[in-house]
Amino acid sequence: MRYLSRSFLLGALHRRKEVEQFLGPITVGGIEGIRWVSIWPWQDGYNVSIHDVQDLDDENYRDLSVFPSLDPEGEDDQGPGRLIGHVQDPTEALELAERTTGASPHRWVNHGVAGEDYADFVRARHS
């Protein structure tokens, strides 16, 4: 099972593990891309970041963290992606991410797994 139940999701965050979610396609400045959101432990709380990266259109590339950014100048120094906010509580982090990005409460995955949803997206587009 790819997606985390709410209890497993909160458990991962309490253990200071990163979670993420593939959000889908975007276009920035005429360049096709994809967007994903991550929640990761930082200092005494959690950072919520949005990532706009180039769509490599290849189901074999699944590590979204290494995709070229659509706006490398606009990314924060505090970690990958653009920082949406920093909160103290994992539940607050989830609420912030879902409210500001449209992330689904039922599609969160462990770090490194959002690329599986990207691969599904590419396969669906090519079929």
Image: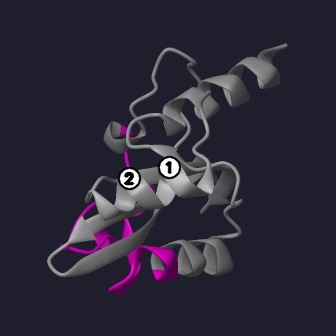
Q: Amino acid at mark 1?
A: Phe
Residue at image mark 1: 8
Q: Amino acid at mark 2?
A: Ala
Question: What is the magenta range?
Answer: 67-92
Characterize the local packing of mark 2: few (<14), some (14-19) or many (20 or more) Cα atoms within 10 angstroms: some
Q: Nearer the viewer, residue 28 or 25?
A: 25
Residue 90: x and y in percent read: 42, 73
Residue 99: x and y in percent read: 66, 80
Q: Nearer the viewer, residue 27 or 12?
A: 12
Residue 22: x and y in percent read: 59, 47
- Give the residue displayed 61% in from the left and 39% down from the top: 3
Image quarter of residue 36 = bottom right
User: Residue 51 vs residue 125: left or right?
Assistant: left
- The quadrant the N terminus occupies is top right
Characterize the local packing of mark 1: few (<14), some (14-19) or many (20 or more) Cα atoms within 10 angstroms: some
Q: Is residue 101 above or below residue 23?
A: below
Which mark, residue 12? 2
